[in-house]
Amino acid sequence: MTNKQAAQSGGWTSRLAYTFGAFGNDVFYAALSTYLINFITSHLFDTGDKALNNRLVSAVTIIIMALRILELLIDPFIGNAIDRTKTRWGHFRPWVVVGGTISSITMLVLFSNMGGLTKTHPYLYLVIFAFLYITMDIFYSFKDVGFWSMLPALSFDSREREKTATFARVGSAIGGSLVGVVVMPLVLFFSLQSNGGTGDDRGWFWFGFIVAAVAFISALAVGFGTREVENDLRENKEDTAGVSAVLKMLVKNDQLMWVAIAYLFYGVGINLVNALELYYFQYIMGYAKGFTILQTINMFVGVVSVFAFPVLANKLNRKPLFMWCLTLMLAGIALFSVAGSNLALVLIAAEMFYIPQPVVFLIVLMIITDSVEYGQWKLGHRDESLALSVRPLVDKFGGAVSNGVVGQVAVLAGMTTGATAATITASQVTTFKIMMFAIPAVFIVIGMFTFWKKITLTEEVHAQIVEELEKTWGKDYVADAETSVDQLASEIHVESPIAGKLMSLDQVSDPAFATGTLGQGFAIKPSDGRVYAPFDATVRQVFTTRHAVGLVSDDGVVLLIHIGIGTVALKGTGFVSYVTEGQKVTRGTELIEFWDPTIKKAGLDDTVIVTVTNSENFENIDLSVAAGTMVEAHQDVLRLNPREK
């Protein structure tokens, strides 16, 4: 399939179906990670024996924590199974539908007392619960991994991918927030008894039913509303990394390790506060509807916070922005701890705590992404999939710990079946506040201190690393050429990848290129923004900043096409890449498109530099057109002869 065909495979139907899938995915996850625990602790066990009820609540929440940690070890096998799936419907869609169906059914059963088993045979219930929970968690992971992994398969056009990803992110944010808005109104609407604003098991069952239905329908929408692009690029070349591989890499990549540790402490802290907020409204304030108000505000504030990130990051840079965000969160926790039942103060404190969370997520994601090039620079090899798997692993581990702790907090604070705000004693309130505010604050401070002391991978450092990698690229691929030098034709021709004014390398303002240290070649002062393949080749490197691409021709020429000087600082703004690493391209295939005014507005040089990075394998590397001549894309401009062995 060509790039144009791949690009045309997207469109509004696929985009909207994928967005609805993201919405349903996060509705399900929010119910699983936060509200299922609330149902279990508040309504599930009513044996008539308070001590037994508490033991059962503790047992269930410990089971959940243990199973969620166990599922981390299963995730790599899930990824491998999806990669190896080959059906007429594609790699991913079958798992989205199957995983969505089974996880939705099991979720619904978990939002019930299973026909009264919690009273008649509570220990049998625990066994069945554990089986159903791990089944649900595994199939949800199949759906989740399959869903987010299919994004690159929907189109090979990076602009279409960006649109789809943006829409999906909005759908995801709305889904995760909206479930918090509707949870208590739905529970109370379907409940036969309000129980001081906490509802009853009937109300929670119908809430679970609606969540399961939305998740199931959204999975079907993805299954029938999207289409995966068939292309050789999607052939899996290596297994998904396991937890042990991630840990080994963390030891070697110190910046990735420290950001993971800082994020882990931070994540445990915020997960505890977020998970206990509903309990606060139910049992401290006695006003469950206040939680609906809070989540409604969060839904809009979260979107604004995400869009504010680029502006804030440009003004403050990531490291100080991270510190300011956590400082605001700690101030919010302090205010929250003394707000009591004052709704206005509680909402202000909760927003001070919530507003920075989307920004912190993006900061951590950006640093983890940058650590890919840091690891490549430090270790000599690139571990992209391993590095990017760290964040979800840490998120899942933090969520698992939070699930286990919340159940124990509910028992210690007396917030179990039959409890209301009126039954909670002063000492139980103190215990609850220590667990909701003091302990999370300690975790957040540890994460804050770790980040400040250990993270040295700033935007400036990353830009320097990327420039170094770009300028040394190609040496590792000399031996990869499929044709040996002594089998080549006597003369090889290299075309101009772009239209413009031809320049000799010594006219380039960057000394590393001008001296030929990085290989011989030529430069073009562009009159257009489209960059094409100058020969049949394999794409060996697509830089994350999208302003450079590395090719290896079928006859052994290792070529770097570098757009502009210092353009790494633009971080990909104004550049669109149309190819993927490992892709076979033919002469004239469009590789990159860039918006020249973006480069000039930033005060940067837009010269396109083309170097043969394995020049030592060739001789008589000469321009075939005089420097200063206006040339067209696809016009021969360089000739070289293989050096005899």
Image (cartoon, rainbow, N blue to C red):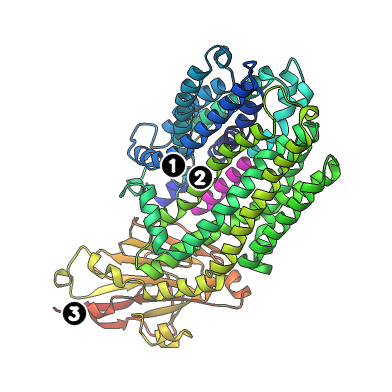
Across and down, in percent, residue 421 comes to 78, 30
Which is more foreground, mark 1 or mark 3? Answer: 1
The magenta segment: 157-173
Q: Is residue 120 above or below residue 15?
A: above
Q: Residue type at mark 2: give it.
A: Phe
At x 82% / y 46%, what residue is drawn?
A: 339
Residue 502 lies, in percent from the top left, at 43, 80
- Image spot of residue 511 (x, y percent): 44, 86
Q: Earlier in the sequence, mark 3 or mark 2?
A: 2
**Decide: marks 1, 3 in contact (CB < 8 A)?**
no
Front-most of residues 59 and 223: 59
Query: Helix, strand, or loop for circle 1?
Result: helix
Q: What is the secondary structure assignment of the residue under circle 2?
A: helix
**Label 1: few (<14), some or many (≥20) within 10 Å?**
many
Picture disc at residue 39: none
Q: Is residue 602 left or right of residue 391?
A: right
Check residue 397 in the rendering and tell me which mark sits there, or answer none.
2
Mark 1 lies on residue? 72
Q: Label 2: how many residues lie within 10 Å, few (<14), some (14-19) or many (20+)?
A: many
Contact (Cβ within 8 Å) of mark 1 with mark 2? yes
Dot 3 lies on which element? loop
Image x and y of residue 625, in percent = 36, 81
Question: What is the total number of numbered labels drawn onto the structure image?
Answer: 3
Is residue 228 visible from the viewing direction of this image? yes
Circles 3 and 2: CB atoms closer than 8 Å? no
Task: Residue under label 3, please give it.
Answer: 643
Closest to the observer: 310 or 328?
A: 328
Above or below, 587 against 628 in this view is above
Label 1 – label 3 distance at C-alpha: 52 Å
Amino acid marked by disc 3: Arg
Mark 3 vs mark 2: in front:
2
Disc 1 to disc 2, how far (Cα)?
Answer: 8 Å
